[in-house]
Image: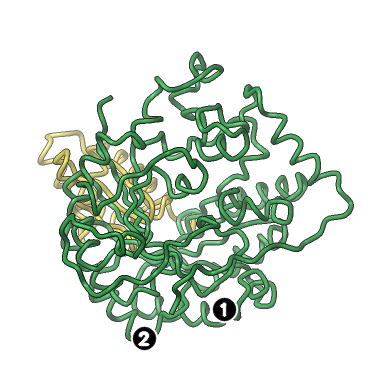
Amino acid sequence: MPMQTRTISDAARPRLAKGVRLQTDSTTGKNVLLFPEGIVELNETAEEILVRCDGHTLSEIVRELAEEYDADVAALAADVRETMADLQQRNLIELT
Amino acid sequence: MTAPRPYALLAEITYRCPLHCPYCSNPVSASLCEAPRRPQGGGYSQTHAQAKRELTTDEWRRVIREAAVLGVLQIGFSGGEPLVRRDLAELVRAAREANLYTNLITSGIGLDDDRVRALYDAGLDSIQLSFQSDNADLADEIAGAGAHQRKLNAAAKIRAAGIALSLNFVIHRRNIDRLPQMIEFAETLGAERVELANVQFYGWAFLNRAALLPTRNQVIRAREIATAAKARLAGRIDIFYVLPDYYETRPKPCLNGWGQRYLTVNPIGDVLPCPTASSAIPDLRFENVRGRALDWIWRESESFNRFRGTEWMPEPCRSCPQREIDFGGCRCQAALLTGNAANTDPVCEFSPNRSVVDEVLRDTNSSSSYRPDWTYRINPNGIR
C-alpha cells in the first residue's frame, strides 16, 4: 500500500520484515541488515530505528532519540519518518 | 594484491537434481557428483578415491566456520538440488551457529513436513523456491519432470512454517510472455520477494542458447512489465529483475568484481571465484578445501588473484572510466564467446568482439524458423 507510507502515523510500530536480520558484522563492529542475497550497511538514523523494532512506536522512537541526541524534535521526526518509509518501501521493515 | 573481505559464500552442496531444466548453469560435464563416502572427519588429508566425491558433513562444517572467520555474513545453499543431501539441516545449523544468514535455493522437490520442520528448527532464514512458469503444463515441460504441483505443495509448507519465501523464475524465450501471470502467481502465493532473472548463458544454457534467447520485442515488453510491477508492488513484494545482458550495450558488473565479495565452493570442494568459472575457464586451476585453508585460497590463490582489481585489464577496459563500475563484465562470458577470459566482456559496445554477440542477436531476431527444441540437463553419474 504505497499511499500509507507517505503518511506514517505516530502510532506506527516498525518491525523487521520476515526474512530480515539485524546483526553485528564482526569484521567492522557495525550493525548490518541481512536479507536474501542482500546486505545493507546502515546509516545512523536507520540503525537507531532498527534497534527499536521491538514494539516501539514512531513517536516513542523520536522522543528517545531527541533526548539522546538533544536534537530538534520536528527535524528528527521528519528524518525518522523518511527513513522508515524508505525501509518499508524496500520491504526491510513492516509497520503494524 | 590485497584481498578484501568476502561477504557471501555460495555452497553448492551437490550437483544431483531431480529436474532437467535446459537453462541450468551447472557444468555440462559434471562428473563430480557421487555421494560422499562415510564420514572422513574434517581434516585436510585426501586420497585419490575421495577427491571426486562430494564433501562430507564435517568437511562442510569446517568450510562454514572458516568462511565466517574470513568475514562471510551470508551463505546460500544451492546445487543441484540441496535437499538431495540428507544433512542439509545440519549444515544450516552449523551456519547459524557461525552467525551466518542462511538462504536455501531449492526446487522444493523433497521438501516434506519433516524437512521443513528440521530446517526451521535449524534456524533457516529464507527459502528461494524456483518455478519454471505459473502454468503447470509449461512448467513441467521446461523442468522435464512433473514438478509444478510438488512445488506448489512446497510453497504452502514454507508459508505455514513461517519461513521467508522468495520465488525465483528463470526467464527465457518460452516463458517470457507470461511475465504478468508469473507476477500475479507470486502475489497469490504470498511471496515476500520475486526474482525474475533472464537466463544467463553458461553450462546447459549456453548449449541451449538458440532455443532460450528471447527476441528483442519480448525483452522490451518484459522490461516494461517488470518495471511497472516493481513500482506497483513496492512495500509489499520486492521485485528483482535481472536483465538479459546480450541486449545491453554495457556489461553486467559481474560479482561486483572478481574475488571482491563472493566465493563459491562446489560439491567436491573446489573453491571458485564464480560458480560457472570451472566450466567456462578451462585454463584456470582451482584450489580445493581438502588441500588448503579457505583463507589462503581467498587471499593467495592464483585463481582468485588472476582477475582481481584492474591490473589484468586489456584495452578498452584499462583506460575506461567505467572500469571500477562494471569491472570489464563477466570473465566466463569473455572466455565462452571470445576464447580468452581476460578479454573485455563482448557484451560491451566498446569490445572489439561485440560482433559475436550481434551475430547471435541477428539470428534470434531474423530467423523465421525458430525451433524450440533443447537438450535437457542430464543428471550426473552416481545418483541414487
Q: Provide the letter of the chain coloured green.
A: B
Q: State which mark lies toward you, 1 or 2.
A: 1
Subunit bearing disc 1: B
Left or right of B211? Residue A92 is left
- For the residue carrying disc 1, how many other residues have a C-alpha within 10 Å: few (<14), some (14-19), or many (20+)? many
- Identify the image's colour scheme: rainbow, by chain, secondary structure or one colour: by chain
Instruction: Say above or below: A26 vs B316.
Output: below
- For the residue carrying disc 2, how many other residues have a C-alpha within 10 Å: few (<14), some (14-19), or many (20+)? few
Residue A94 visible to the viewer: no
Residue beneath label 2, please? B113
Q: Where's residue B165, x and y in %?
A: 42, 67
Q: Where's residue B281, x and y in %?
A: 49, 41
SS at mark 2 in the image: helix
Instruction: Say above or below: B249 vs A36.
Output: above
Q: Residue at x 39, y 84 (%)?
A: B112
**Residue at the extreme right of the image, as rendered:** B368
Task: Pick the residue in front: B82 or B95.
Answer: B82
Instruction: Say above or below: B111 vs B355.
Output: below
Q: Provide the letter of the chain coloured yellow.
A: A
**Residue at the extreme front of the image, as rendered:** B48
Subunit bearing disc 2: B
Residue B147: mark: 1
Task: Pick the residue in front: A10 or B299.
Answer: B299
| Amino acid beneath label 1 | Ala
SS at mark 1 in the image: loop
Mark 1 and mark 2 in contact? Answer it, CB < 8 Å.
no
- Res. A80 image quadrant: top left
| Amino acid beneath label 2 | Asp
Q: Earlier in the sequence, mark 1 or mark 2?
A: 2
Q: Residue at x 38, y 52 (%)?
A: A37
Q: Where's residue A71, x and y in %?
A: 17, 34
